[in-house]
Structure formats: structure tokens, C-alpha cells
Amino acid sequence: DVKVTQSSRYLVKRTGEKVFLECVQDMDHENMFWYRQDPGLGLRLIYFSYDVKMKEKGDIPEGYSVSREKKERFSLILESASTNQTSMYLCASSSGFRGNQPQHFGDGTRLSIL
Amino acid sequence: KNEVEQSPQNLTAQEGEFITINCSYSVGISALHWLQQHPGGGIVSLFMLSSGKKKHGRLIATINIQEKHSSLHITASHPRDSAVYICAVDSGGSNYKLTFGKGTLLTVNP
């Protein structure tokens, strides 16, 4: 079974802090994704990566950056956390070179910015 | 941009009832995904389909490409089926993005 592991289930940080969310997958998947999920808005793509050191902006990249130095690890960085970044963050991975493969999700990190 | 609409937004059923959740999209797709999210966050992929019908246990997913519509059916519903069900589409092309519906919250009462 594919396992996608997010480093924290719950995280509380302060406004202005630099925040790192880590995601690791164990199935050698090429593609990795970061989403945020907010009530009434559904899942929105922040960034995705289709290979090591490759990244592309999703629908809401502002205020975020990502890093993929190794194939199995995809990090989301909040450069200077703000209260409007309080949300549930979900990481996912998939195989293949297109988006038509099932995505495997982590359990999510509920991030609160105070 | 593909618009994905799910209905209903909320659904309450009694144990044993047959459940249908609908998903419509606006632009042709290469694949449609049904996902399940239980309280607490984790999302599980239930089905990926591009035509016809798929069945897994008590769950059945169908898609009508011409009508740009998919349905997720649950037979003999059970309280453990209570979850948010999310439809997502891959619109094809050279990107990797899925477009997600806002989800249907299903509550099955014993």
C-alpha cells in the first residue's frame, strides 16, 4: 500500500513565523501535490511537482513556496505565516506522467496561525 | 476552466437506504475521480473512471461522457459510510491538475 506521511497532524504557529510542512511518500511516485482545504471552498491546489527539483504553481501559490530535493519528499513553506493561512493542508502523490492516475493522500495537517 | 458541481451538498439517510451522489462538469475530461474523506481529514481514492461503470463492494460509480455527468451509488448504506464524498476531474492537456467539487457530506443514521 502507498503511504503518504505528513509530519504533523496539528500545528500552531504565530504570525510572521516561517513554517515548514513536510510530506514523504514511499512508492517512488513522480508527482507530488500540496492542497489546502477550507470549508465551502473544497480542495485547492497550491503547488505540485512532477520530478525532483521541478515545481509548478497551482491555483493559489501566493504566500507559499515548495522544495523537492529528493523524489520521496515534498516540503511546503509558508515564508511569513499569516492568519489567512489557517487551514487544513493535504499532501498527495501519484505515479505516471499525467494527472489521470489516482492520487494518494496523507492524513492532513491542521495548521492554526495565531 | 472546468467547473465541477456536486449535488446534493448534504445528505442524511437511514441505514440500509440506497444513496446517490451526483457530479456534473462543464468541459470534456480524460478521467473522473471519486474520493472519500472521513472526519479527521484523511482522503481515500475510491474510483477513477473514464467511461462506463465500476463497482467495488457496495459502491458503484458510473459516468456518462456525453452528458458530462457521473454518479456515485452506495447500496445498503451503513453508518460507517458517513463521510464527505468528493468528485474531481482531470481535464486532459499537458498539466497534472485535478479540479475538485466542493464535496457532499453524507450522514447515515442507524
Image (tube, coloured by chain):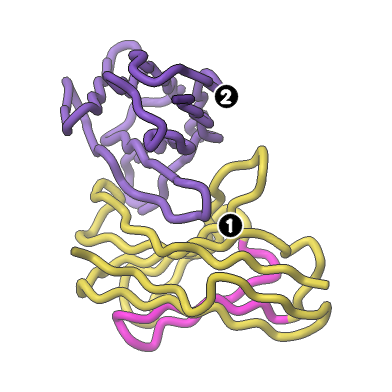
Chain colours: A yellow, B purple
- Residue underneath mark 1: A36
Q: Position of residue B70 (x, y in %)?
A: 33, 21
Residue A2 or B16: which is nearer the viewer? B16
The quadrant holding residue A88 is bottom right
Whole-number angstrom distance, CA of label 1 to CA of label 2 = 20 Å
User: Looking at the picture, how far across and down is residue B110, in whole percent?
Assistant: 44, 25
Give amino acid for label 1: Arg
Label 1, residues with CA under 10 Å away: few <14, some 14-19, many ≥20: many
Q: Is residue B61 above or below residue A63?
A: above
Residue at (58% x, 42% y) in the render: A42
Tell me the chief SS of the magenta region: strand
Relative placement, left or right, of B25 versus A19 is left
| Mark identifier at residue B9 | 2
Please give the name of the residue rendered at 39% of the width and 69% of the height, measured from the top-left corner: A49
Q: Is B58 located above or below residue B45 in the figure?
A: above
Residue at 70% in and 81% down? A79
Chain letter for mark 1:
A
Q: Which residues are magenta?
A: A61-79
Q: Residue furthest front?
A: B110
Residue A107 in magenta stretch: no
Of A1 and B76, the residue lying toward us: B76
Label tally? 2
Query: Where B21 sits versus A22, above or below?
Result: above
Q: Residue at x 57, y 24 (%)?
A: B9
**Mark 1 vs 2: CB contact within 8 A:** no
Q: Give left or right: position of B48 versus B44.
A: left
Which amino acid, by three-letter code, is at mark 2? Answer: Gln
Residue at mark 2: chain? B
In the image, taking residue B44 as reference, residue A67 lies left or right, namely right
Label 2 residue SS: loop
Q: Nearer the viewer, residue A41 or A96?
A: A41
